[in-house]
Amino acid sequence: MFNALTSSITEPEIREKIRKIAQLVEISAILNSTLKPDILLQNILHSAAELLDCSVISILLYDERVNELRFAATTSVNIDQLEQIPVPLDNSLAGTIYTENRHLVINNTKDDPRHYDEVGDEVGLQVDSLLGVPMRIMDRVTGVIEALNKKEGEFTDFDVSLLLVIASQAAISIHNANLIQALQRANVELSQADKLKRDLMAVASHELRTPLGNILGYATLLHEDAIDENKPLAESILKASSKLRAVLDDIANMNLLYTGEADLDLASTSLQQVISYAREEVNQTVDREDQRVVYKLPEDPIPLRVDLPKMSVVFVNLLLNAIRFTPAKGEITLSVEDRKNEVIVSVEDTGKGIAEENLEKIFEVFFQEEDHMTRRYGGLGLGLSIAQGLVRLHGGRIWAESGGLGEGAVFRVALPKPDEGPSDA
């Protein structure tokens, strides 16, 4: 192809070819400067018309739904007029270029039976000469570029070479633009689906909270007043109600993180106060599960500036997660490492452990290591996601460690200490 670009000719012709080759480089930059299909097509048309010195440039793209070529852009008339005119693959010059994947140069179209007169008749354009090349992505032809009516002389091999380069650039640019548009549409659809999911979570947690509160209240009274033979039944109702409340709390907290409405009400407190707050929430569950939880806290208060209720949720979720995956008579240990600028809280259990490939995945929303149809441990898979979101809101870090399945696990939370400088008061 490039032999035609550099063949031995007169000096003025050489200078003109060099100028046009330089323009090809500029065209490449122009085509890659936008991902908007309409602007992109117009850039291609104007660049090609200038380089080839012709009256009309048209781009036809293959429409696989009807197995025909359709005009995508042109310099001759309003594209809306041409879009309504399909160009068949059989018995048309554009169709020949497309199906045979080769260029055509016809400097007298009147003598060629393949010339499709319907388009010219419809828009009032007389076609005297034509140069057309296929637009290709790798080995796949996606359309055709046609140059019509050379202003001076005839279309040459050099013109063919120029248009082939433009067609190659154009095919890639159009393909990329279409991919970006498809990605944007997919993102919009995902955003809409995500909003629907958030709205459903918000409505469900709100509508279920009131009747569940009544159930919990009556279940508590029933448990307190039940005679011995009814105690197990009352205990079962209370336990089921408590688990449902935990699920609703998880949904509400996750929805706040999704919507960005989980604003922090920061206040000065201590790590010991946060753990105490969480411990009260967890104690009832620990008693029912017959597990031992050990709290190893330093005597001296460790200052923190956090949202106390929200930060306590972090440790409630970590402790409940450890309880859920640790068998009866197992042990969960909460310990603290006090560093200069941060404090690290570790929740370690003697439970089922975590596979190495899942150490990051367990923080994903709804992730469960076991199959959702056969799993034994319950829960929605939101607790760790909520903990991660809340820790990050506080500027901290959270991660998991495990020797593997059967080796137990440890979750570590690193929280920054407040500055020791003077307060704003």
Image: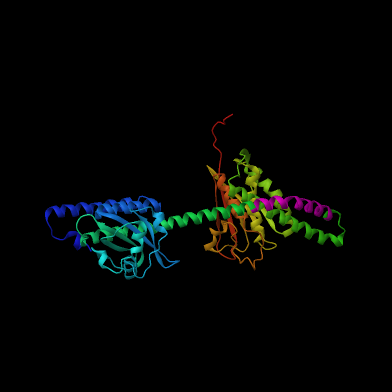
Instruction: Identify the residue shown where x is 61% and y is 64%.
Output: 352
Using the rendered image of the protein, determine whether residue 211 is visible from the camera's viewpoint.
yes
* 309 displayed left or right of 167: right
* Residue 5 drawn above or below residue 335: below
* 231 displayed left or right of 195: right
Q: In which quadrant will I find the N terminus?
A: bottom left
Residue 70, x across and y down, in percent: 39, 61
Residue 84, x across and y down, in percent: 42, 59
* 226 displayed left or right of 322: right
In the figure, residue 4 lies in which quadrant?
Answer: bottom left
Instruction: Identify the residue shown where x is 36% and y is 63%.
Output: 118
Residue 104, x across and y down, in percent: 27, 66
Q: Which residues are magenta?
A: 200-222
Residue 393 lies in the magenta stretch: no
In the figure, residue 303 lies in which quadrant?
Answer: top right
Front residue (pair 63, 383): 63
Name of the residue lying farthest toward the top: 425
Front residue (pair 244, 107): 107
Using the rendered image of the protein, determine whether residue 295 is visible from the camera's viewpoint.
no
In the figure, residue 401 lies in which quadrant?
Answer: bottom right
Q: Main secondary structure of the magenta part?
A: helix
